Amino acid sequence: MDHDLNLLRTFLALMEERNVTRTAARLGITQPALSNALARLRAMLRDPLFIRERYGMRATPKAEELAPAIAAALASLDALILGQQAFDPAVATQLFTLAPNSYVELVLVPAIIARLGERAPGIKVRLTPFGSDLAETGVTSGQTSVVLGRIQDPPDNLVVQHLMDEGFACVVRADHPRVGKRISKKEFEQLKHVNVLPPGRLRAGLFQLFDRQRLRRDVAVSVTHFLAVPEMIAVTDYCATLPRLLCRRLASDPRLKVVPTPVDLGTFPVEMAWHVRYRNDPAHGWLRSVIAEAAEAVAVSSTRASTRGDARGLARS
């Protein structure tokens, strides 16, 4: 029996989105076309597959049973086909979609783009938001090439690779009346703080670190992006606790100074994840090697800077 592979990909998109409007937009087709495809899927698989509910669709037991097998079969087929294709970065004209979190976008993506520009001038890159859920980035469906950041609870169809570890430091204004080259636990707890709110479940990360270290923080303002922090700190007596590499960049701003955290807050991982269908794709494998190389270079540069010492006090943080 002949099967339309595009229908099976539509089925997986519906399984992930559970919403006709979002699935149609994601696939680039009209809602009537999607409804037609769903009718054909139901006939082919001999099951209703999805039941309409108030806020979307609920998959039937058979749909839930079929989804992993269909996803694995399509991933194997993609790997077989893509693995046969040659890739020459010097002449390639592909578009890669990356989903970095806001931290990675600032400290790592520029190094990635620089390497791509040197070695593959025809390659184009599009950035999409990391989002509060991996499915929203498009990586779980394979539409997005790579997601970059801290990957929590990845589904079985994602491969995760560790890139580097990152620590923390504090930033205050350069002429802060109460903070010198270092900040004590007491001073830290008496100050007001600027907090950066990452999306979704990651919001709890830094708060949990403070709780484990029994370190109190009086958050006066919460912002949604790291770029808002330096302007906020420069005109207040507030303090911000940020990833170390971001702090190292802010240390060049004469309005600011970077100091070690009052207690050791440990590190957090920076990771890369991609869909299993790209495991043997030569172009995707090359892209992943460039990303890993850029991350290693950034990490090594940070380590060397810390070893040399930093006039602003960050080196011994």
Image (cartoon, grey):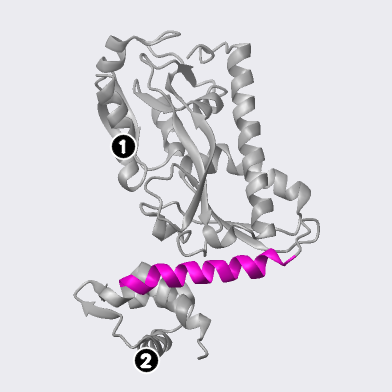
Whether residue 7 sits left or right of residue 145 in the image: it is left
Helix, strand or loop under label 1: strand
Residue 279 visible in image: yes
Q: Is residue 136 above or below residue 165?
A: below
Q: Quadrant of residue 37?
A: bottom left
The residue that mark 1 highlights is: 222
The percent coordinates of residue 115 (x first, y second) are 71, 44
Q: Is residue 302 above or below residue 158?
A: above
Helix, strand or loop under label 2: helix
Whether residue 116 sits left or right of residue 139 in the image: it is right
Mark 2 or mark 1, which has the lower sequence index?
2
Q: Nearer the viewer, mark 2 or mark 1?
A: 2
Residue in view at x 66 percent, y 32 percent: 297
Dominant SS of magenta comes to helix
- Check residue 2 for magenta coloring: no
Query: On residue 33, which mark appears?
Result: none
Viewer-nearest residue: 220 or 280: 280
The percent coordinates of residue 314 (x first, y second) are 51, 15
Q: Residues within 10 Å of mark 1 (few under 14, many from 20)?
A: few
Q: Amino acid at mark 2?
A: Ala
Span shown in magenta: 64-85
- Check residue 66 for magenta coloring: yes
Label 2–label 1 contact, CB within 8 A = no
Cα distance in 3D space between marks 2 and 1:
51 Å
The percent coordinates of residue 293 (x first, y second) are 66, 39
Viewer-nearest residue: 275 or 65: 65
The residue that mark 2 highlights is: 43
Residue 59 visible in image: no
Q: Is residue 52 above or below residue 80?
A: below
Q: Amino acid at mark 1?
A: Ser
Viewer-nearest residue: 191 or 130: 130
